Image (tube, rainbow, N blue to C red):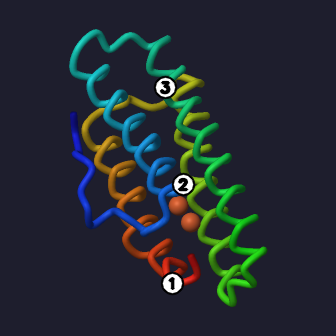
Amino acid sequence: MYQKWEEKFSVGVEKFDSQHKQMLDKVNQLYDEIHSGHDQKRLKELLTQLVVITEKHFADEENDLKDKDYPELLDHIDEHNNLLQEIHSLKDLYLADRLVLDDEVIGFLANWLGVHTTETDSGYSHLF
Ligand SMILES: [Fe+2]
Ligand SMILES: [Fe+2]
């Protein structure tokens, strides 16, 4: 395990906390695979799953925030799109065998997830 879930990651919304936990689990599974079998097929699957659950999570957040007329929705969507672009290119590079998955990549993923929850998402907590 690379990063344990901590209370500071909570955005105070159960549904979104549990989705964030799933994303963190995926990062930890990637880390564990890198440090055990380093099976490339498995790593490709895990990266693809991370992209899929992230897309679903962002879409869910954006729908709920739209329903609640979140004033910073457009900025929030921009940030989601930037993050998505980053993990898409990471996944595409890895699927094309043009990237080595190592602790640095895991650190990057854990960091973007941490920033997403503790900074970007913390802004909407008061709406729920
Ligand atoms: Fe989120
Ligand atoms: Fe978000």
Residue 89 badge: none
User: Left or right: 31 with respect to 66?
Assistant: left
Q: Are marks 3 and 2 in contact (CB under 8 Å)?
A: no
Q: Which residue is mark 3?
A: 46
Say few, some or many: other residues with alpha carbon within 10 Å of mark 3 (under 14 / 14 to 19 / 20 or more): some
Q: Is residue 73 left or right of residue 48?
A: right
* Distance (Cα) linking label 2 and label 1: 15 Å
The mark found on residue 15 in the picture is: 2
Quarter of the image that includes the N terminus: top left
The disc labelled 3 sits on which kind of residue? Leu
Give yes or no for contact between labels 3 and 1 (Cβ–Cβ under 8 Å).
no
Instruction: Give me the C-alpha separation between circle 3 and circle 1.
Output: 33 Å
Of the numbered discs 3 and 1, the one sitting upstream in the chain is 3
Give the SS element for disc 2.
helix
User: Which tag is nearer the camera, tag 3 or tag 1?
Assistant: 1
Q: Report if the beta carbon of the residue with label 2 is closer than 8 angstroms to ligand 1.
A: no
Look at the image and tell me in which quarter the C terminus lies.
bottom right
Pick whichever, 35 or 28, lies toward us. 28
Whether the residue under disc 1 has CB within 8 Å of ligand 2? no
Q: Which mark is residue 126?
A: 1
| Residue at the spot 51% in from the left edge and 48% down from the top edge | 19
Q: CA distance from mark 3 to mark 2?
A: 22 Å
Q: Does dot 1 land on a helix, a strand or a loop?
A: helix
Q: Which residue lies at the image location 78% right of the left edge and 74% below the top edge?
A: 67
